[in-house]
Image: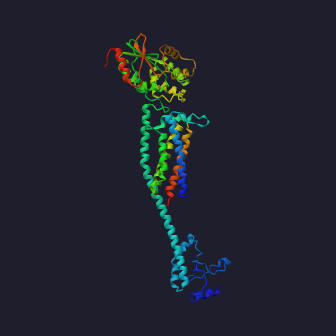
Amino acid sequence: MTEARSRAAIAALAVAGIGVAAYLTYVHYADVQALCVAGGGGCEKVQTSSYSELVGIPVAVLGLAGYVSILATLWIRGETGRLAGAVLAITGFGFSAYLTYRELFTIDAICQWCVVSAVLMTLLAALTTWRLLAAE
Amino acid sequence: MADRDDEQGKGGGGPERTAPPYEFSGGESSGDDDAPREGGQRREAPEYEFSGGESSGEQEKDKEDPTPETAATKTPDGTFKARHRSEREEAERARKAKAEEAEKRERRRKRLKKLGWALAPIALIALIVILVSNIDDEKTGGEQQGPPVGGTAIDKRFQGIEQDGLTLGDPKAPLTLVEFADLQCPFCKQSSDNVLPVLVDKYVRPGKLRIEFRNFAILGPDSEKAARALEAAAQQGRAWQFLDLWYLNQGEENTGYVTDEFIRKIARGARVPDAEAVVKRSNDKSTPDTLRAARTEANRFGVDGTPSFLLGKTGQTPTILQIQDPSDPNLFTQAIDRQLGGPQE
């Protein structure tokens, strides 16, 4: 995969992540129910659990900031940008892993939107790390 | 082929020699590139044979062998020099490729190291934040996790205070505060968390105030299930521990958190003697007497929301207590002090 293609793929994933996180942020602040496929009540349960916030900040907002930052690193030239992108995406991946663990073992409910976000962040972590290591 | 051998036997070919430039014949051995392709008629193995620009590891090894160089330098012939040059270029290319590969590996290693250094402090901070966040949850009673929190503190809060059903405090206390509340209502929780401890310490324990809880479930089936559970806890003399602990661990209304397991946890945390009886009553759909009575009284006083309060002298008809912010204990103490005839110690 060329540098241009990896950048495009990262940009696409980050934009998708921004979409998901923006929707969950809206759901959090507008106090409406998230749309869940197959009527899963998991979204509501997860969104209103005590884990939907970290030190007072909704995790959806943290996710939104993360995706925007990853997208922004694509415009930073050289290794600094690639390193920043990888650091952010790996951090996001770690946080997603923690939240998924909480969903499965503490809240006992799965939010489909959160799963989509976790998958996006996992792909971003893999791609940005590859981009950093494979660069000329 | 015999001619070539002859030439070599004479000590090298002349300028008219037409051997392919990649052919190399050492001083002690002769070879022919074409020989293997012609059916293996070659007499000796072509030790220093090269086949075009492509090189293999074995060939690279050959190129680095000092023997051909010695042979080439021994030969004054220009063709040998040309072959030797090509060979050296090959060797140089291979060396460069190796060096580049090594450089790449080193670059990757350095980048990985940088990545590790950048991630280490983030991981550390994340760990601390998660730990602190969990401790906060324990304090404030995050829903859905482990045993209900605050059981011990609540035990102390109500220790030695008389309880009769849903009424807390000395029956002879001069003032009575009536609270209409729903166990699922978030504002009732705020009031219970912030105001109740103040009222208990300042007025109820010294015998100046009694509080009557009205089991006013208005937020749907989960609220009614909670109200039935509360009534069962009240019958066992632990209503106030039960409702206070419930509020501390309250979840988002009507999200399905009011399960048998949740009720069991609260009942056990509140040390209700028979927690299973509480769970059982919560599943018995018959309307609790306390809920029916609360509805009747709410109608009488025009109460239609929670939390709502009435205040008055014990034994007399109370009046609606207008409180702007039910989570502000000062508003309550001011109203109570007025009725008691001045600020209380």
Q: Residue at x 49, y 24 (%)?
A: B183
Above-or-below relation of A91 to B9: above
Question: Is residue B27 visible in this depiction of the protein?
Answer: no
Percent position of residue B289, x then y: 53, 15
Q: Is residue B209 left or right of residue B283?
A: left
At x 52%, y 71%, the residue is: B93
When the figure is inspected, residue B89 is found, relative to residue B152, above or below; the finding is below
- Judging depth in this view, the residue of B159 and B143 nearest the camera is B143
| Applied colour scheme | rainbow
Task: Give the camera-side residue of A45 and A62.
Answer: A62
Residue B33, compared with residue B94, is above or below; it is below
* Quadrant of the image containing the C terminus of chain B: top left
- Residue B124: horizontal and vertical position, in percent? 42, 46
Counting from the top left corner in percent of width and height, residue B161 is at: 40, 18
**Is residue A7 visible in the rendered structure shown here?**
yes
Q: Is residue B265 above or below residue B29?
A: above
Q: Residue B88's spot in the image, x, y percent?
A: 52, 76
